[in-house]
Image (cartoon, helix red, strand yellow):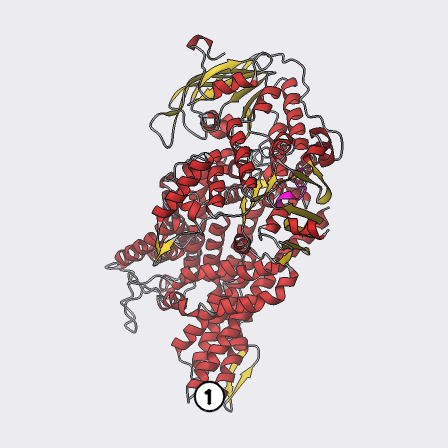
Amino acid sequence: MRIMEAENIIEMLHITKEFPGIIANDDITLQLRRGEIHALLGENGAGKSTLMSVLFGLYQPEAGEIRKNGEVVRIKNPNDATALGIGMVHQHFKLVDVFTVLENIILGAETTKLGFLQKKEARKKVEALSEKYGLKVDLDAKVEDITVGMQQRVEILKMLYRDNEILIFDEPTAVLTPQEIDELMATMKEFAKEGKSILFISHKLNEIMAVADRVTVLRKGKYIGTVDTKDTDKQSLSNMMVGRPVQLQVEKEPAKPGEAVLEVEHLCVPSKSHKRDAVHDVSFTARAGEILCIAGIDGNGQSELVYGLTGLEKCSEGKVTLCGHDISHASIHHRGGDMSHIPEDRHKHGLVLDFTLEQNMVLQRFREPRFQNMGFIKQGEVRKYAETLIEQYDVRSGQGPVTIARSMSGGNQQKAIIAREIDREKPLIVAVQPTRGLDVGAIEYIHKQLVAERDKGKAVLLVSLELDEVMSLSDRILVMYEGEIVGELDPKTTTVQELGLYMAGAKRMGKDGEGA
Amino acid sequence: MKQGRSNLLEKDSTKSVLASLISILIGMVVGGVIIVIVGLGNPNLGIKGALDGIRLVFFGLFSTGRVDNALTFGFNSTNMGDMLFRATPLILTGLSVAVAFKTGLFNIGAPGQYLMGTAATLMLALGIPSEVVPTPVIWVIAFLGGMLAGALWGCIPGLVKAFLNINEVLACIMTNWIAANLVTWMFEGSNFRNLVENTKSGYIYKTTYNGVQTAKLGLDKIFPGSQVNAGIIVAIVMAVLVYILMNKTTLGYQLKACGANRHAARYAGIADKRNIVLSMAIAGSLSGAAASLYYLSGNTEFFWSTYQSLPAIGFNGIPVALLAASNPIAVVFTGCFMSMLDIVGMQLTNLTAYNEYITDVIIAVIVYLSAFSLVIKMLLNGRKKHKIQAVPEAKAAAAAPPPDNGGTAEGKGGDGV
């Protein structure tokens, strides 16, 4: 036992953390060995992020202790954590939007001389790190102008820059491309070889099996067990996590495409940061009863395409027809009449985080006579509606309809958005990375919902960066590369490798093969 | 189910109230400490003077003067009534700031909106011939005119923010000074200037000159000897209306959604730009109403050459709103508290050897520290274990900033009345 202890660089013993109405961590023990990659697995709201926030000093546990190298330490704030060599990449990035990438990386660990910033040295160090680990970033770009995937790299570089020896990755692969994920996995293994210890929060069983040495599983705030990855498999891990047998494959009947719901002709959307269009001359048709997937590496115009369709950005050219109406220049409100939208950034566009869950549930619908009378909100109706949705879509939260959205776990926030959007019963559902950062249980659920909506005769436009999702869920795949559609593929006949070639821009179809 | 919710709400609101009370107490205690220090350093005051000062800080509202060189206390109708009278504009500017806060905006433009409201109200109240139009009608027109002027002035920072994405604080500060100069220019050379009564120069006629005055509704019978009038009732009604607007209507829902997350609101099809302008217009109209009620009372005069100063009532709306945690109903009480401090200040000056300047400093310190209610609430929300340690910390933190209160004191100095 003594030898075991010496091996552990970090021990979290019997940690208990409560929030109003919910015990996020109930007597959880986690032991991280030196130089290992230790995965933390659990459903949304299982308490993984909370546990890591305790380790990082963001929360103080009600009970339990943390030891480093066998000695009890008290981590009162992130500065204490940093001093102990603990670094963390958060699920929702903690970056200053208006600062440049470099400024963000050095923030809080600036090299100074007589009070002046020594950016040159910092730049050299960051450049070396980004070179070494293949984490390419534009150091002078402002964070608000770069993609979510890039922001993730900035977060990882931030941690590397601080020479942390204990690295916490809170779902780091959610937004990376398959190639990038492979690279990150290799990088993580290299870290481990160098003697760094890694805590890796992920829902992706593939990744855990590929990279982790051991896995600790949490479920609903409780500790379920710790297993060696070599003694287990994906199915038993997911069963441990969810507490019931989970279906890992999407089951669906062949699609029966009907009428065109959404027709896009020669659409162009200007880019904010470049002169050339973010979306250039894109044409396609989404039909009722099919799931049309836009695949591509992050930052190839998918986000802007969706902005153009939903009205968040103005289209410079082209025509968008939804259910027979030209909506190219319609307002967001007007477009919402026939379109549901599960946005990419659930915090920015999906929810008003300081509103309660019930207020968020009626964000688009509060004007309907059902929810208001002469401009007065019918609180009772809103409550009833929210309770129905919460029950029907199993949205878990501390205080039900009056829970502040900010206090909910990421997965349940996403479930709330999906409940709201699907329940609006619109002919077109635009879903952008709907399963980003979610666990297998929730992914299974969301996939089933989308297939069910398809079978009801809705058109589903899915934008996804996850190859597995693209291959298993879609009925038709369009690949975007540098703002253009470079290929249309049938998931039944194509392979992941071929898809990858299109995504990387190495292969493209002739003009005649483009569009629908 | 419903009970469960109201219990939870109560919990949070109880915390807010508690936080505000604690910060008021901290403010008064620190004010008391300053009184003692000043008292001991001044041979005219000494320990006895300091003790008198402290008693007045806490119970000044109930002071009834001095008998045989000892302070006497009891119900003082003049003080009570004057407190309500002075609270009226503070409640409304407090509401103005609170509405903006709730919608994610910082309305530091209340002084400018207040000035524009003042100008519109006075011009309408004095300009409409009372021989032709009945005075109650003039009153209503002047009141609505003041609100409209405030609303239009509030729109400017709103428009600039919505369409040019310029920070509203910047635009508000600039429009404040534009208003100060504009109002001076409008009255300079106008025949609203009071040249008849030669006792004072530089003032505009009281509205009573044209027979326009806020009704007393018997309040002068309840609080004899005071300036109180029905304006306080109007202010309370407006607080209730604002509460209903913000919490019960779809408009309030939209305004708050835009304030809390403009992107999500826009994305849900809510017209974010319109709502930002509307928020500022509502805030402005409340500041305008503050001015209307103050100057329509009939016993207040406006010093028209105001281009070098901004009305303190406008700025004092900020601590009123902060102390109330932007709750419109709580604003009524915090507004009364602020005006009570005014009364306390007068009592200190009149009944002790503390002069009006040190009184202003003490009052400013109390106002300043009262605004710490948010910090206190955060501490209350923290874990109970931390609570005991945290309160002394808060005191230490609170004790440090007084040198900064120059801003508040300056604001007070700028009062045009």
Q: Is residue B317 above or below residue A252?
A: below
Q: Is residue A254 visible?
A: yes
Name the side, left or right, on which B12 lies relative to B375.
right
Q: Does the magenta run of residues contain B104?
A: no
Q: Residue furthest bottom?
A: B68
First to last magenta residue range:
A41-49
Dot 1: within a 10 Å radius of its alpha carbon, few (fewer than 14), some, or many (20 or more) residues? Answer: some
Name the side, left or right, on which A64 lies relative to A162.
right
Residue B106, x across and y down, in percent:
44, 52
Name the side, left or right, on which B5 lies relative to A322.
right
Q: Amino acid at mark 1?
A: Gly
Q: Residue furthest right?
A: A244
Q: Quadrant of residue A61?
A: bottom right
The residue drawn where x is 56% and y is 57% is: B329
The residue drawn where x is 42% and y is 89% is: B43
Q: For mark 1, name the chain.
A: B
Q: Nearer the viewer, residue A181 or B169?
A: A181
Residue A287, x across and y down, in percent:
56, 15
Q: Nearer the viewer, residue B212 or A286?
A: A286
Q: Nearer the viewer, residue B103 or B239?
A: B103
Q: Is residue A61 visible?
A: no
The residue drawn where x is 53% and y is 80% is: B55
Report which residue position mark 1 lands on: B46
The kind of secondary structure element at disc 1 is helix
Q: Residue furthest left?
A: B189
